[in-house]
Image: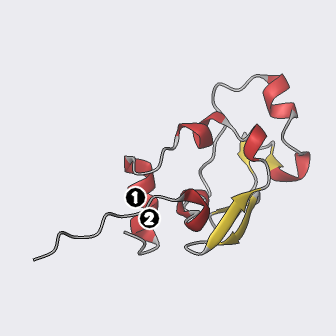
Amino acid sequence: AAPAAAVSFDCQSCGACCSYSDEWPRFSLEDDATLARIPPRFVDDARGRMLCSGGRCSALTGVVGGSVSCAVYAARPDVCRDCQPGDDACLQARAHFGLN
């Protein structure tokens, strides 16, 4: 029997981590100068995180599981930088969308 195909962790054809929860991405160790780089329309100041609607980050563009991108990729918060393709958070979000 042929070995099972490896799961692809191409973030630009996934986006599950950016659509998984209204509770993140939550700001943590970013300083004021770093946060100022994120356009205000994407920030939920009252909750100290990226603005989300229905679990989806407002900076995510495209279709989850299809083709996505981040409108603030260069200035994305630390929690977004810490999420790595194939890590536990990634796999949990992918499972939620049936992408595993």
Instruction: Indicate the position of residue 84 as horizontal and vertical percent values.
Output: 48, 44
Task: Label 1: state its secondary structure.
Answer: helix
Q: Give me the residue at 67% from left, 66% from top.
A: 68
Instruction: Indicate the position of residue 30 as horizontal and vertical percent values.
Output: 70, 26
State how many labels appear: 2
Task: Label 2: state its secondary structure.
Answer: helix
Toward the viewer: 73 or 40?
Answer: 73
- Indicate the quadrant containing the C terminus: top left, top right, bottom left or bottom right: bottom left
Task: Judge the density around disc 1: few (<14), some (14-19), many (≥20) Cα neighbours within 10 Å.
Answer: some
Toward the viewer: 16 or 56?
Answer: 16
Residue found farthest to the left: 1
- Indicate the quadrant containing the N terminus: top left, top right, bottom left or bottom right: bottom left
- The type of residue carrying mark 1 is Gln
Q: Is residue 19 visible?
A: no
Q: Which residue is mark 1?
A: 92
Task: Judge the density around disc 2: few (<14), some (14-19), many (≥20) Cα neighbours within 10 Å.
Answer: many
Q: Give me the residue at 73% from left, 48% from top.
A: 50
Q: Quadrant of residue 15?
A: bottom right
Q: Which residue is mark 2?
A: 94
Whether pointer 2 and pointer 1 mark residues with C-beta atoms closer than 8 Å, the reply is yes
